[in-house]
């Protein structure tokens, strides 16, 4: 069935083709895909050139087959089944067959950088992200068409509650429901775009469209005086360069004055340095050019790639032999190659006669080097790139004796640049920053911008899907700027600045005039407004007469429902907040905006200056923010989930700090705590370092500590129920249909307040505050000053920034020492790990000052000090006199002492420095004050320079020369510092030895027993003891004399008693004994030398009879007993 087409649709397409603007059409309905044929036909009729190419992006299922044979087979099956006539022609199938269409998955959309298309089709709305939106829309040329396909729905308000694929990454176990605020703002912003039409699948214009009142442009409508003035300037510039080789022919291909001047900057660096008159040595004619870095920064569609291609043609003409070209993917260089060949054609070079083109034989999108796998082929047509292989090499042989090559390399293949003379980097913001540093030279990779043996041309996008390209401007280009010259760059009208001096020269070029589409394109304005891309990072002091003191500023909570409602006041405030992000961060991307709006468990806080009501005109104006904080609530994970994840070695999405700390320390209870992570904190570009960021964090910590909220005052609920404000709107949406509804921005009275005082809002219960960031000296100093303690440093640097991720945590102001005991235990354990890891390759690259700052952030925390105090008062790690010999032998101590006395070279004690450094930084050399109950430590103090030297040489195993480079100190001064610190360390170790000797000596106040040697019975005698002398020596002598006199008298009495006894009966009769044998034995003993071997006891034999003995006894008995006879014992037999 045919129907008349709404005339507003072709009017929109024709007007924008005339103005070189892009058109945006939203097709609502399941059959909207069939209308793409008609819209493409309208676009082809309005354009004079060839049929526009199409870029079709989708998530996974295209819904139809793009294979010709499969389509033919399907047609045959349908004819056999009788559901299709044999000669029936489907317009959509014809469109797919004859149109140049490139089909791309959303996940592979990075391959389309550097390409230009006439029409863009976006399907699968639920898979769209802000990054994908900016990446794809910016590939459409002026006069082109952007089509967004939506499924059938009764009302576009259904998108307000539609779940997006990215929301799955936002959900955590403890988070609430995801609110798609970004979708509402997306639809409302499209409805406000004058070049956007909402159509149903029958091409009926919906009343939501602002472009429904479009009118046909007059036939003779110029493009304005500004464009004419620019055309005049460009024409004059081309005329002035006519006849100049190679600048003249190349400038004729430029489209804008900016692009022409940028091209002249590149050519000037080539021609001037290669002037033969500048040097008598032809080999050194390129020496200055090889030390030149040229940066080209611009927004999308400004002609960067085409300018690089034309400049490459000039480099080939100048005689550069080895030219290397790189980009995120070889497909991104299609425009560069195309304009390179146009430039060579303009210079009179011919393909096959002067140069050959080689294409890759396989897909190189996986970052593989295509140098070895290339085949010679013809030039790639600019019409389409759907199954074409990218160009990887151009061999130039115009001069038979001078070979020239332009070679594509993978960004990670920096090792092949040994013989390079010129390196060209396109889309540098899409390449990780460490990779770009490696491409610029080995010394640049280490942070020194004075490196390089080849010229570098670097082009990048500053406003686009990359976010703002701040990684280049804040990091790389700023470093190049600082190291290239001490003089300030001078800037001209075209934004070009040049700074010279030193070993390298830096040229900066900026492009502002669009080429892909005309200036003032409404779709570009809509995209920049929606994604906050085109934000000038103006300094905050320009909005203040005088900057307020940080203590006078107040922190407010931002209601996200109001902030992302697309209300004009909210939009102004949102743009100001994003300008702070752009000024402070270098990892911005459009996806961060959706994270900020939709992620549950995220809150926004803003620091505002004091609000004065003196001026009535300023009373209703939103103040300019000084700082903004984004906080994410983490933790409160169930024990079952923790154990399940740890047992499998996996972790769920979100909850960065809880899962990370739980895995690192294997402590399951930490993930059960409730914490807040500072996702981002940003301050204005002109107020950084003035204390506003610290003020904001301190206010945030005080708020979550409960210091602001007053329980006596009625406060509002944290999670305001939006249904109360949108009840009427939902009722209207039920009654309205797709063709009758009018979606508008909510009234201000129907929305909650944008800003809320912290005293009116109940704080969430948090156990800690944490942050995760890329470790740099400035950021570490900021968080360390706010009492945050590092608990984790990633072992490998980030692929995006080349920095190590650092996680720091602190307790709230209301937390007690007992509640934060876990923080001290974790920090002490991390300190032990870090002291060992500092000698490994990645951590060894840390500066000694940075490593010292990390250790100071740990050691200065009160919880860590309490842990160290407990250890020193009897813990296992206490450095006791008994433990010291197991760590350091007497020879080691003697070596340290000799070096401290300047008697040895430092190489003799080099092996002891790791142990000494470990003992010092673990604070095991500190001395506890046992007399005090506070548990304080008497620390071994070293100066900052001495500590840095000890850390660098002891823990990181760096040489003295490396320390000299880091600290900018002469070697002699470093060694002198080393002697002083070793002398202090040795003194402390000797003190520990003395403590052990003192403990082994007897105590004068104690009782000590003295051994006695008076005789065998001395063990039982009373022992003498040490004590005070109570008598004089004379008294002691007189007492001893009296004792001796008493002993002599006793001996005399004993002698008298012995003498009174009759001893005659014991007398020996010499006549009755035989002495001959005894005398012989005595003589023998006297004549022998070895007397110990002989028996010295002699025996004497007595000769006496029994009768004589008996008679003698009888006589004795008669005399004594009066004749009484003594009875004898005799047996019975004897008696008988």
Image (cartoon, rainbow, N blue to C red):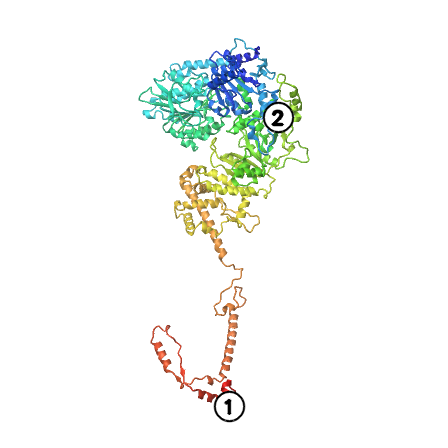
Q: Is residue 324 above or below residue 1089?
A: above
Q: Which mark is residue 1118?
A: 1
Q: Residue furthest top?
A: 219
Q: Residues within 10 Å of mark 2 (few under 14, many from 20)?
A: many
Q: Residues within 10 Å of mark 1 (few under 14, many from 20)?
A: few
Q: Secondary structure beneath disc 1?
A: helix
Q: Is 1015 left or right of 30, judged from the image as shown? A: left
Where residue 650 sits: x, y (%)?
Answer: 52, 36
Would residue 221 be seen by someone viewing this image from the given angle?
A: yes
Where residue 733 sits: x, y (%)?
Answer: 64, 21
Q: Secondary structure beneath disc 2?
A: helix
Label 2 belongs to which residue?
562
Q: How many marks?
A: 2
Where residue 1108 sits: x, y (%)?
Answer: 44, 88
Q: Residue furthest left?
A: 401
- The CA span between labels 1 and 2 is 148 Å
Splitting the image into 4 quarters, where does residue 313 fall?
A: top left
């Amino acid at each position: 069935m045919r129907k008349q087409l709404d005339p507003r649709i072709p009017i929109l397409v024709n007007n924008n083709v005339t103005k070189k603007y892009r058109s945006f059409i939203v097709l609502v309905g399941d059959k909207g895909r069939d209308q793409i044929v008609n819209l493409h036909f309208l676009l082809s009729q309005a354009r004079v050139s060839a049929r526009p190419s199409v870029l079709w992006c989708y998530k996974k299922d295209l819904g139809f087959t793009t294979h010709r044979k499969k389509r033919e087979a399907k047609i045959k099956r349908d004819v056999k089944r009788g559901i299709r006539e044999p000669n029936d022609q489907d317009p959509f199938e014809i469109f797919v067959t004859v149109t140049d269409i490139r089909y791309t998955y959303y996940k592979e959309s990075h391959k389309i950088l550097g390409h230009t298309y006439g029409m863009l089709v976006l399907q699968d709305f639920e898979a769209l992200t802000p990054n994908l939106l900016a990446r794809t829309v910016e590939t459409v040329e002026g006069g082109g068409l952007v089509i967004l396909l939506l499924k059938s729905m009764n009302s576009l308000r259904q998108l307000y509650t539609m779940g997006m694929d990215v929301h799955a990454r936002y959900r955590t176990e403890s988070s609430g429901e995801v609110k798609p605020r970004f979708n509402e703002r997306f639809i409302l912003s499209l409805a406000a775009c004058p070049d956007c039409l909402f159509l149903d699948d029958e091409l009926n214009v919906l009343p939501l469209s602002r472009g429904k009142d479009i009118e046909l442009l007059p036939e003779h409508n110029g493009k304005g005086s500004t464009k004419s003035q620019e055309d005049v300037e460009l024409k004059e510039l081309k005329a002035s360069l006519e006849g100049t080789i190679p600048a003249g022919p190349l400038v004729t291909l430029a489209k804008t004055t900016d692009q022409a001047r940028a091209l002249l900057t590149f050519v000037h660096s080539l021609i001037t340095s290669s002037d033969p008159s500048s040097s008598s040595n032809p080999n050194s004619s390129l020496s200055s050019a090889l030390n030149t870095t040229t940066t080209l920064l611009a927004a999308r569609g400004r002609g960067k790639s085409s300018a690089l291609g034309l400049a490459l043609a000039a480099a080939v003409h100048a005689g550069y032999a080895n030219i290397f070209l790189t980009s995120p993917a070889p497909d991104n260089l299609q425009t560069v190659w195309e304009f390179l060949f146009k430039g060579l054609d303009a210079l009179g070079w011919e393909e096959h006669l002067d140069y050959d083109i080689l294409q890759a034989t396989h897909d190189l999108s996986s970052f593989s080097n295509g140098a070895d796998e290339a085949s010679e082929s013809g030039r790639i047509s600019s019409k389409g790139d759907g199954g074409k292989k990218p160009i990887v090499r151009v061999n130039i042989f115009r001069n038979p004796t001078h070979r020239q090559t332009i070679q594509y390399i993978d960004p990670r293949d920096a090792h092949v640049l040994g013989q390079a003379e010129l390196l060209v980097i396109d889309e540098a913001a899409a390449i990780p920053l460490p990779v770009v540093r490696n491409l610029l030279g080995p010394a640049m990779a280490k942070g020194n911008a004075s490196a390089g043996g080849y010229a570098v041309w670097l082009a990048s996008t500053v406003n686009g899907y990359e976010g703002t390209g701040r990684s280049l401007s804040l990091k790389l280009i700023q470093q190049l700027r600082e190291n290239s010259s001490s003089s300030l760059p001078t800037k001209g009208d075209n934004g070009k600045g040049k700074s010279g001096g030193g070993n390298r020269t830096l040229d900066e070029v900026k492009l502002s005039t669009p080429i892909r589409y005309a200036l003032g394109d409404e779709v570009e304005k809509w995209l920049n407004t929606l994604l906050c891309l085109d934000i000038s990072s103006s300094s905050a002091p320009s909005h203040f007469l005088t900057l307020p003191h940080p203590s006078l500023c107040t922190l407010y909570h931002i209601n996200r429902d109001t902030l992302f409602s697309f209300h004009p006041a909210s939009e102004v405030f949102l743009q100001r907040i994003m300008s702070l992000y752009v000024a402070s961060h270098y990892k911005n991307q459009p996806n961060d905006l959706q994270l900020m709006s939709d992620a549950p468990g995220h809150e926004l806080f803003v620091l505002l200056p004091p609000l004065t009501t003196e001026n009535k005109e300023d009373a209703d104006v939103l103040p300019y923010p000084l700082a903004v904080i984004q906080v994410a609530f983490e933790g409160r994970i169930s024990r079952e989930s923790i154990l399940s994840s740890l047992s499998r070695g996996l972790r769920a999405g979100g909850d960065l700090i809880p899962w990370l700390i739980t895995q690192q320390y294997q402590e399951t209870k930490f993930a059960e705590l409730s914490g807040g992570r500072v996702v981002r904190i940003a301050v204005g570009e002109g107020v950084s370092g003035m204390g506003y960021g610290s003020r904001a964090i301190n206010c945030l910590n005080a708020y979550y500590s409960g210091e602001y909220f007053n329980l006596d005052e009625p406060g509002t609920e944290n999670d305001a129920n939006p249904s109360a404000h949108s009840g009427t709107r939902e009722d209207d949406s039920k009654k309205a249909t797709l063709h009758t509804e009018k979606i508008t921005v909510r009234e201000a009275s129907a929305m909650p307040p944008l800003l809320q005082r912290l005293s009116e809002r109940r704080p969430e219960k948090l156990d800690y505050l944490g942050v995760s960031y890329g470790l740099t000296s400035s950021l570490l100093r900021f968080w360390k000053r706010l009492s945050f303690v590092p608990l984790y440093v990633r072992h490998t640097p980030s692929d995006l920034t080349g920095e190590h991720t650092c996680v720091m945590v602190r307790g709230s102001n209301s937390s007690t020492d007992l509640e934060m005991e876990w923080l001290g235990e974790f920090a002490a354990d991390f300190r032990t790990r870090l002291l060992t890891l500092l000698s490994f390759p990645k951590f060894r690259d840390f500066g000694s000052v940075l490593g010292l700052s990390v250790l100071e952030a740990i050691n200065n925390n009160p919880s860590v000090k309490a842990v160290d105090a407990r250890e020193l008062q009897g813990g296992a790690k206490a450095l006791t006199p008994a433990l010291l010999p197991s760590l350091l032998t007497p020879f080691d101590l003697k070596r340290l002492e000799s070096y401290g006395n300047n008697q040895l070279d430092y190489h003799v004690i080099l092996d002891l420095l790791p142990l000494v450094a470990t003992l010092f930084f673990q604070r095991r050399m500190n001395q506890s004050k046992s007399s005090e109950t506070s548990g304080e430590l008497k620390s071994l103090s070293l100066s900052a320079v001495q500590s840095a030297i000890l850390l660098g040489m002891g823990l990181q195993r760096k040489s003295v020369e490396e320390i000299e480079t880091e600290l900018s100190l002469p070697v002699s001064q470093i060694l002198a510092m080393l002697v002083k610190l070793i002398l202090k360390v040795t003194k402390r170790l000797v003190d520990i030895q003395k403590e052990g000797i003192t403990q082994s000596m007897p105590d004068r106040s104690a009782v000590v027993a003295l051994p006695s040697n008076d005789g065998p019975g001395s063990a039982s005698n009373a022992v003498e003891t040490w004590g005070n002398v109570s008598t004089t020596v004379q008294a002691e002598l007189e007492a001893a004399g009296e004792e001796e006199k008493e002993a002599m008298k006793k001996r005399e009495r004993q002698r008298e008693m012995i003498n009174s006894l009759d001893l005659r009966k014991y007398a020996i009769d010499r006549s009755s004994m035989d002495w001959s044998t005894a005398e012989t034995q005595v003589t023998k003993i006297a004549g022998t030398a070895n007397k110990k071997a002989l028996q010295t006891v002699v025996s004497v034999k007595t000769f006496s009879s029994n009768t004589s003995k008996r008679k003698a006894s009888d006589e004795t008995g008669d005399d004594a007993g009066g004749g009484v006879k003594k009875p004898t014992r005799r047996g019975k037999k004897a008696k008988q």
